[in-house]
Image (cartoon, rainbow, N blue to C red):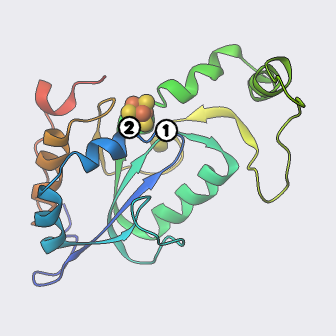
Amino acid sequence: MEKVAQNSEKIKLATVWLAGCSGCHMSFLDLDEWLFELVKYADIVHSPIADIKEYPENVDVCLVEGAIANEENLELIHKIRKQTKFLISFGDCAVTANVPAMRNMMGSNNADTVLRRSYLELGDITPQLPKASGIVPELLEKVMPVHEVVKVDMYIPGCPPSADRIKAAITPLLEGKMPLMEGREMIKFG
Ligand code: SF4
């Protein structure tokens, strides 16, 4: 693996929440006091747990939670790839598309089908489709895992990955080394 940061520099670490339930980020927060260790070696430059709106340039490592399900996800993942050295598919939704991709089984027009079911047929009060150009992103016709859209450098499966697995995967990266992603503890799905 290419060393992601110079020796004396802190790594620029980002985490991103795309089409997922935020459970992977909850697991990240389960790192508890180890997060204080982490910030000795990494600056969190973008994350749902930090109030930084724009994805910055020159990110060293990014953990991407969630599948690519709408136009906003699609645009953002291309930006992330362009501005990140080492991109990690973080959790089963990113790795396989998982739960968000269940609508793919309904075939073509599935986006319209789920929207109509959720917002019209099951809408109790003023049922209406969510439409607001530039505000509510359009659903894509197919939900995709991250690697179907951009190159992925490493996968951390799990729904969610345990805090121990996240720690074991991230720690070597802080030294510019690749973690050993094998065995039940590191790559079991679910
Ligand atoms: S992998 Fe599981 S925990 Fe993570 S976002 Fe998807 S459903 Fe949630």
Rendering quarter of residue 182 = top left
Residue type at tag 2: Gly
Is disc 2's CB within 8 Å of ligand 1? Answer: yes
Residue 20: mark in rendering: 1
Quadrant where the C terminus sits is top left
Q: Which residue position is annotated with label 2?
A: 23
Rendering quarter of residue 161 = top left
Between 164 and 139, which is closer to the camera in this rendering? 164
Does residue 8 appear left or right of residue 138 in this picture?
left
Q: Residue furthest bottom?
A: 8
Is disc 1's CB within 8 Å of ligand 1? Answer: yes
Q: Measured along the vertical axis of the image, is residue 142 above or below residue 190?
A: below
Give coordinates of residue 50: x percent, y percent. 40, 67
Does residue 153 appear left or right of residue 46 in this picture?
left
**How many C-alpha atoms fall within 10 Å of the one at disc 2: few (<14), some, or many (≥20)?**
some
**How many C-alpha atoms fall within 10 Å of the one at disc 1: few (<14), some, or many (≥20)?**
many
- Tell me what residue is drawn at x 65 percent, y 53 percent: 72
Q: Measured along the vertical axis of the image, is residue 56 above or below residue 133?
A: below
- Tell me what residue is drawn at x 21 percent, y 30 percent: 187
SS type, badge 2: helix
Looking at the image, in which quadrant does ligand 1 appear?
A: top left
Q: Nearer the viewer, mark 2 or mark 1?
A: 2
- Tell me what residue is drawn at x 79 percent, y 18 percent: 122
Give coordinates of residue 24: x percent, y percent. 35, 41
SS type, badge 1: loop
Residue type at tag 1: Gly
Quadrant where the N terminus sits is bottom left
